[in-house]
Image (cartoon, rainbow, N blue to C red):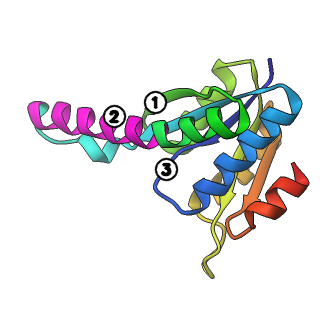
Amino acid sequence: MRKFLVVLDDTRECLNAMRFAAMRAARTGGGVQILSIIPPEEYQHWMGVADLMRAEARERIEAHFEVFAKWMRDKQGVNPELIIREGDPVAEILAQVKDDTSVGVLVLGAGTEKSGPGPLVTQMTRSSGSLPVPITIVPGDMSKERLEAIT
């Protein structure tokens, strides 16, 4: 089964990327893989503090995932899979795409700020020529109705 890989982070645009991935998966018989990345700077402290911070980050990620997963299951009939990786976001996304051959599309949400679509979209599009899968970039301010119409 082809999976849509979508990144779960603390940005607003992440919501539209999640919606798009779930709707496309539901309409094409695919799956959704939700990737959340804990950046290394979040836990570069003393060993005990680092372990506690890592555990708290995982709990926060799992709580956010459950909100999206419930919506995907209830509204789209899609049961997403959660992947948590630690490291540089771009490197970990690239590693996940290369490690899991069932990933067919990378879905990213684009920010609506004047400064651009966001660092992740900017960095991933630079790497897009060497990716083994296409990237779908979902505008962060696209309405739910428009997302439904195009998926």
Q: Which residues are magenta?
A: 48-65
Estimate how packed mark 3 is, as few (under 14), some (14 to 19) or many (20 or more) residues with alpha carbons within 10 Å: some
Residue that numbered label 1 is attached to: 84
Query: x, y (%) of residue 87?
Result: 42, 37
Pick the front one: 76 or 80: 76
Residue that numbered label 2 is attached to: 58
Pick the front one: 103 or 97: 103
Q: Residue at x 71, y 30 (%)?
A: 77
Residue that numbered label 3 is attached to: 9
Under mark 1, the amino acid is: Ile
SS class of the residue under badge 1? strand
Under mark 3, the amino acid is: Asp
Q: Are marks 2 and 3 in contact (CB under 8 Å)?
A: no
Under mark 2, the amino acid is: Arg
Q: Quadrant of residue 140?
A: bottom right
Q: Is residue 88 magenta?
A: no
**38 versus 103 height, above or below:** below
Horizontal placement of 95 versus 26: left or right?
left
Q: Are marks 1 and 2 in contact (CB under 8 Å)?
A: yes
CA distance separating discs 2 and 3: 12 Å
**64 versus 121 height, above or below:** above
Whichever of callouts 1 and 3 sits on the residue coming sooner in the sequence is 3
Horizontal placement of 130 versus 53: left or right?
right
